[in-house]
Amino acid sequence: MKHILVTGGAGFLGSHLCDALLAAGNYVIALDNYFSGRLENIQHLITHPHFSMIEHDVNNPIFVTVDAIYNLACPASPIYYQHDPVKTVTTNVMGAINMLELAKRNNACILQASTSEVYGDPEVHPQTEDYRGNVNPIGPRACYDEGKRCAETLFFDYHREKHLPIKVVRIFNTYGPRMRADDGRVVSNFIVQALKNEPITVYGQGLQTRSFCYVDDLIQAMIKMMATDSTITGPINIGNPGEFTIIELAKKIIALTGSSSEIIYQDLPIDDPIQRQPDISLAASVLGWKPTIALDEGLKKTIDYFKE
Ligand code: NAD
Ligand code: UDP
């Protein structure tokens, strides 16, 4: 039985990853400081004989014996990552160093949950892994974008200098059950607003695009990436290439919930990327993976979760 550490294990993606790794017969250790994650996301696992939980901040070193590490610890929604931007940078950078050191001591493979935000406001569309991005290094999103870029740098330096087995996945907007209602991300915001028949807050004119991946598809890709041989490091894009404007998303959610909400328009946040769509050719060829859950189907499952 493999012992696998999931940092950010009480978060949205981390908790689903813990479920999937346990179902596959692993021993799972979740580590989290509960900044944007919640104990209730993993409450159902607490009594599982092959699960343990460590309350810890990745900014501090830790030693546990593990065979593999998934590094997800970092707030992911703009509201949460801009709450304490300096801490967001250190969580990405010091957190990466501490987890890379832990991987080195264990000779364990480590996977980094990177992001499409490394491409910034992209001038290449759809985004391929060789595109180097267009990030504003001094804007309000930079703590996250540059933090994640630096984490990728550290992963590849540990790989080159210390021969550490690494995997880097660049995750595009992912949604599903266990997102926080107050998380501020577009899917959770719109669903909560629609269910309460409150105004749907579209930022800008809503013509900016995103490509939304359902959580189950994403988790399968992460696990497949970890299972690749040591020559495969990534970075590899993971996401659903179906591209929608934010106004299309708002209308879809109003229709699926049968809501009487009106759409209102608010200021577009600074540096909000205008378009985003993953090129997933590399994931298809290297992982034999493609997403299977269409936006309508995934939204229905997510709406059911928020109804409860
Ligand atoms: P989330 O906020 O629900 O999960 C992040 C988890 O990390 C939370 O449980 C939080 O408490 C924990 N955490 C934050 N700072 C920590 C610290 N210093 N020490 C220990 N734990 C800490 O967000 P998520 O959507 O589940 O994202 C998980 C990872 O995936 C993040 O690294 C994020 O950047 C990445 N990602 C997510 C998306 C997405 O669309 N969901 C897209 C790109 C990348
Ligand atoms: N957005 C919006 N209304 C909201 C929340 C977000 O119009 O209530 C927009 C936001 O400006 C962005 C897109 O939806 O263009 C996706 O935002 P999110 O924060 O979910 O993800 P990210 O910008 O990090 O991709």
Image: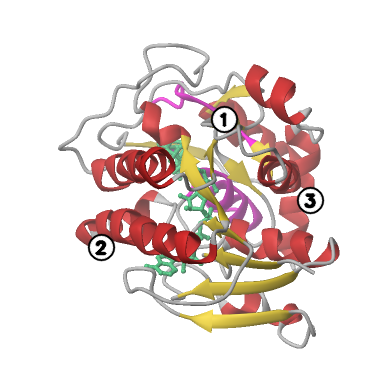
Mark 1 Cβ and ligand 1 under 8 Å apart = no
Foreground disc of the pair 2, 3 = 2
Mark 2 Cβ and ligand 1 under 8 Å apart = yes
Residue hosting label 1:
236
Between 153 and 231, the residue placed more toward the observer is: 231
Mark toward the start of the polypeptide (3 vs 1): 1
Q: Is residue 179 magenta?
A: no
Residue hosting label 3:
301
**Stretch of the chain drawn in magenta:** 185-212
Mark toward the start of the polypeptide (2 vs 3): 2
What colour scheme governs how the chains and residues are painted in the rendered image of this protein? secondary structure
Q: Is residue 33 left or right of residue 257?
A: left
Q: Residues within 10 Å of mark 1 (few under 14, many from 20)?
A: many
The residue type indicated by label 1 comes to Ile
For the residues labelled 3 and 1, the Cα–Cα distance comes to 27 Å
Q: Residues within 10 Å of mark 3 (few under 14, many from 20)?
A: some
Residue 177 drawn at (x, y percent): 69, 58
Residue hosting label 2:
87
Seen in the picture, residue 66 relative to 135 is either above or below; the reply is: below
The residue type indicated by label 2 comes to Lys
Q: Residue at x 72, y 44 (%)?
A: 227
Secondary structure beneath disc 3? helix
Seen in the picture, residue 62 relative to 262 is either above or below; the reply is: below
